[in-house]
Image (cartoon, helix red, strand yellow):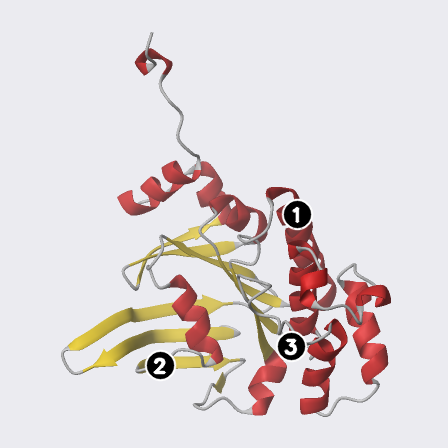
């Protein structure tokens, strides 16, 4: 059995005759310390997978297990010691009236950690900020700095699985590589398992060993990094995603004279 094992996951929103089938029997198997990617167009269900894992979306069918232990509903405190999530928008995910110190200290207090002050300072050092940022508010930070705080918050409980929902899409292009390299380093140093959702195939190619492609709430193709880099795909949908990710280039012959 895989470290993170998802079988036939179903997520349905609404009721009566107005049902939205967000996930339709999604199965994934992620190995320990692997970086695994989920790609697809907007509305394909990729972010819903992460939300279902951490209890933010209702699971109406299927199962989720971590290291062989079934994930229960509601999630127990031990689950959040093992699994944390980094969201897309670092400003929206941080309380605007809480200092960085409070953002990082509260999870430690809730879960009964000791040496809280030292742990906060260590977490800030690990993400490249340092103790000088400890008593700042989110509005006093750049987008990249806010996302580093969000990463520090996710890591401070010493989890084994990190769910990454478009972690760099809200950042300037010049900052994206810094954050991706930080995440890559932390995974190797801590032996973390990543599940990364992104619409940017270049990000997935850089970060992930394997990936799945989603469409309309279903997995339509499994790929390795080598498959992705070589454009070795079987589905037209995946080929179209790859073409779209390379951008639009106007044919010189079609330019007006």
Q: How many marks?
A: 3
| Callout 3–callout 2 Cβ contact below 8 Å | no
> Which residue, as the protein is rendered here, is positioned at the far top?
257
Instruction: Give the mark nearer the N terminus: 3 vs 2.
Output: 2
The residue depicted at 42 percent of the width and 76 percent of the height is 52
Q: Position of residue 33 (x, y in %)?
A: 61, 66
Question: What is the spatial separation of the Cα atoms under label 3 and label 2, in whole angstroms?
Answer: 22 Å
Q: Is residue 203 left or right of residue 246?
A: right
Residue at disc 3, secondary structure: loop
Q: Residues within 10 Å of mark 3 (few under 14, many from 20)?
A: many
Residue at disc 2, secondary structure: loop
Q: Which residue is mark 2?
A: 59
Instruction: Give the mark nearer the N terminus: 2 vs 1.
Output: 2
Q: Which residue is mark 3?
A: 159
Q: Is residue 156 left or right of residue 61?
A: right
Indicate the quadrant where residue 242 lies.
top left
Q: Is residue 45 left or right of residue 149?
A: left
Question: What is the spatial separation of the Cα atoms under label 2 and label 1, in whole angstroms?
Answer: 35 Å
Q: Position of residue 36 (x, y in %)?
A: 51, 60
Query: Which labelled disc corresponds to residue 32?
Result: none
The residue depicted at 64 percent of the width and 52 percent of the height is 180
Q: Which residue is mark 1?
A: 175
């Amino acid at each position: 059995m895989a470290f993170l094992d998802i079988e036939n996951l179903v997520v349905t929103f609404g009721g009566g005759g107005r049902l939205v089938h967000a996930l339709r029997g999604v199965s994934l198997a992620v190995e320990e310390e692997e970086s695994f990617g989920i790609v697809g167009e907007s509305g394909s269900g990729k972010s819903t997978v992460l939300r279902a894992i951490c209890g933010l979306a209702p699971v109406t069918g299927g199962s989720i297990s971590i290291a062989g232990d079934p994930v229960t509903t509601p999630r127990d405190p031990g689950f959040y010691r093992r699994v944390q999530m980094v969201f897309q928008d670092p400003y929206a995910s941080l309380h605007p009236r809480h200092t960085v110190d409070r953002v990082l200290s509260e999870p430690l207090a809730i879960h009964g950690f000791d040496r809280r002050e030292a742990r906060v300072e260590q977490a800030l050092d690990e993400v490249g900020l340092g103790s000088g940022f400890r008593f700042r508010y989110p509005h006093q930070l750049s987008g990249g700095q806010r996302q580093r705080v969000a990463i520090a918050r996710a890591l401070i409980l010493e989890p084994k699985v990190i769910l990454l929902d478009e972690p760099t899409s809200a950042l300037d292009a010049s900052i994206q590589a810094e954050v991706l390299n930080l995440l890559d380093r932390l995974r190797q140093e801590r032996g973390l398992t990543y599940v990364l959702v992104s619409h940017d195939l270049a990000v997935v190619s850089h970060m992930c060993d394997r990936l799945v492609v989603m469409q309309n709430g279903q997995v339509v193709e499994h790929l390795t990094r080598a498959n992705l880099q070589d454009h070795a795909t079987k589905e037209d949908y995946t080929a179209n995603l790859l073409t779209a990710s390379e951008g639009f280039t106007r044919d010189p012959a079609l330019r007006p004279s």
